[in-house]
Amino acid sequence: MKIIIRLPRVVFTHRLANGSLKPSRRRSPCQKVNPREWELKSVDCSTSHNYEPAPRIEKVIKPKDNGNISISNFAKSEESASLLLKLAHTISKETTKLDRCLKNDGAPELGFSIDSPLEFPIQSVEVEKSRARIIRATEELSALVMGPADSLRWMAWGHSNSLSLHAIYHYKIVKSFPIHETATFAQISKRVGLSELNVRRFLRHAMTNRIFKEVEPGLVAHTAASRLLAENSKMDDWVGFCVEEMWQAAAMTVSALERNPQADDPKQTGFCLSNSTTDVETMFTTFEKSPFRSARMGGAMHSLTDGPGYELTHLLSSPVWLALNKCQALVVDIGGSHGFVSIALASKFPQLRFIVQDTPATIASASPLSKDLSKRIQFQIHDFHTIQKVKGADVYFFRWIFHNHSDRLAIPMLRNLIPALKNGARVIINDYCLPEPASMATKSSCIDPIEEKILRSMDLAMLSLLNSQERDETEYRMLFKSADKRFRFIGVHNSVGSSMALIEAIWAGQDFCQVVE
């Protein structure tokens, strides 16, 4: 067994003929020094000096190492290493691990070319964890080496990405030539009805984001990203919804706040200002008048929820359903659309019964159920802004409902349940729950900063579109308390890997009470 120690650094000086001292050329610590030629430079210990500590054991090299010493043997300890090196080490370690996992799983090679995977091939929890660490570390490393000035400067200029994407979406440039062929800027210009100059400037900007590539001067080919936009209608809807609805609404949000600082009226939003519908109608009413915009929003939401973290398996795995199944519970799925959540739950838990409530148009367009499921799932027209009509159910379930409403509207929604609630009835909300800020969180509760940014962005989107909000655990607790103190808040339950949470409260009042405001 060998022991590697770090030697203290000393400064050798050479005494010249005139008596002065001159720093020596660098010598290895293993070189012999003639004491008559060299002497140690004195150090005044009364002042601060940058010196290394006494020798200490750095690493024990066991026989299996065969005596080979890598540069990592001499790396500084984790406490003293710079953030720059820590991030670089994380990236190196995790990319090596990720590459090994992908190869072992037989996953296709990652890349930007047209035949590269259009979705990241997540095969295991280990792969997802390494991927998240790499994304987090590379983003932080990029910000670190850019510095605050450049980071802020180009962050403020980020709308250029939306501009080039908007042009690509609006002019349908991704469909202007076949996936496996090429086209000149002039050919694309003629096909989409945009000047060659503007085609060129939009595409060359998009190319900096790896959307399209210029294989020869003036000759354009597809990449994996442009192919995805051309072939995946849901992704195309997501881009369209972002650049033609959310971007416009975001640009007018501060102006809307100037008019209504409370930001609690869904008819006084940035979206309403951008659509000239302030004090007239909400976003949902606007979309109901346009089948195209309504369908595009639906496709965009499907694109979002098709990604990892939104799988119904997270909801189905909650232990609350096992207990409810044993007592043959009745679940009211409020705002449940075509009942896809109730259908999934009913398929797994054969003793559960469901009533799915939504608007007349939604209920009318629901697909027929199988004979078995139709015995346990009913559809019912109901407006959740009115008093709940189903009395005595065991569970009143809301999925992706409350984040569309400010407290001003959400509190009455909870109060509308009270006349229908029996003692012990549960209210379960399946929605986002904002985390404790990553900068303040403890190590055990710390959320991934990238995931946090997505949730914070969703919160701002709710403000821009509906003057609504995403909530954290404290805000959900206060929401129930503000509705009625007889609601007993149980807590927030998070499934590993899920982007959504289950927020639960129990009615502790008597059966079918009157609303107390």
Image (spheres, helix red, strand yellow):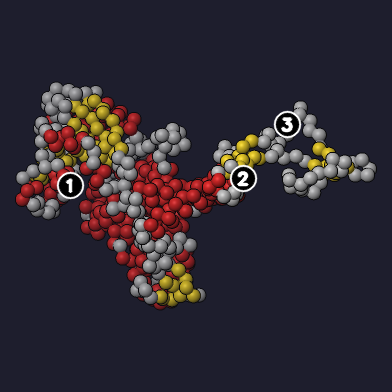
Residue placed at 29% from the left, 62% from the top?
A: 233
Residue 456 placement (x, y as % from top left): 39, 42
Q: Nearer the viewer, residue 372 or 239?
A: 372
* Residue 56 seen in this snapshot: yes
Q: Are marks 1 and 2 in contact (CB under 8 Å)?
A: no
Q: Quadrant of the N terminus?
A: top right
Q: Mark 2 or mark 3: name the one nearer the start of the chain.
A: 3
Residue placed at 57% from the left, 50% from the top?
A: 66
- In the rendering, which numbered label is found on residue 344? 1
Residue placed at 84% from the left, 43% from the top?
A: 34
For label 3, the residue is 48
Q: Mark 1 or mark 3: name the one nearer the start of the chain.
A: 3
Residue 94 placement (x, y as % from top left): 46, 50
183 up-or-down from 122: above or below: below
Q: Quadrant of the C terminus?
A: top left
Closer to the camera: disc 2 or disc 3? 2
* Residue 166 seen in this snapshot: no
Residue 406 placement (x, y as % from top left): 30, 37
Mark 2 is on which residue type?
Answer: Phe
For label 2, the residue is 74
Q: Tell me the quarter of the picture where residue 183 sits.
A: bottom left
- Binning the other alpha carbons within 10 Å of mark 3 as few (below 14), some (14 to 19) or many (20 upward) gives few
Q: Tell me the quarter of the picture where residue 159 sits.
A: bottom left
Element under label 1? helix
Q: Nearer the viewer, residue 43 or 190?
A: 43
Element under label 3? loop
Q: Are marks 1 and 3 in contact (CB under 8 Å)?
A: no
Q: Residue furthest right?
A: 18
- Binning the other alpha carbons within 10 Å of mark 2 as few (below 14), some (14 to 19) or many (20 upward) gives few
Mark 1 is on which residue type?
Answer: Ala
Q: Mark 1 or mark 2: name the one nearer the start of the chain.
A: 2
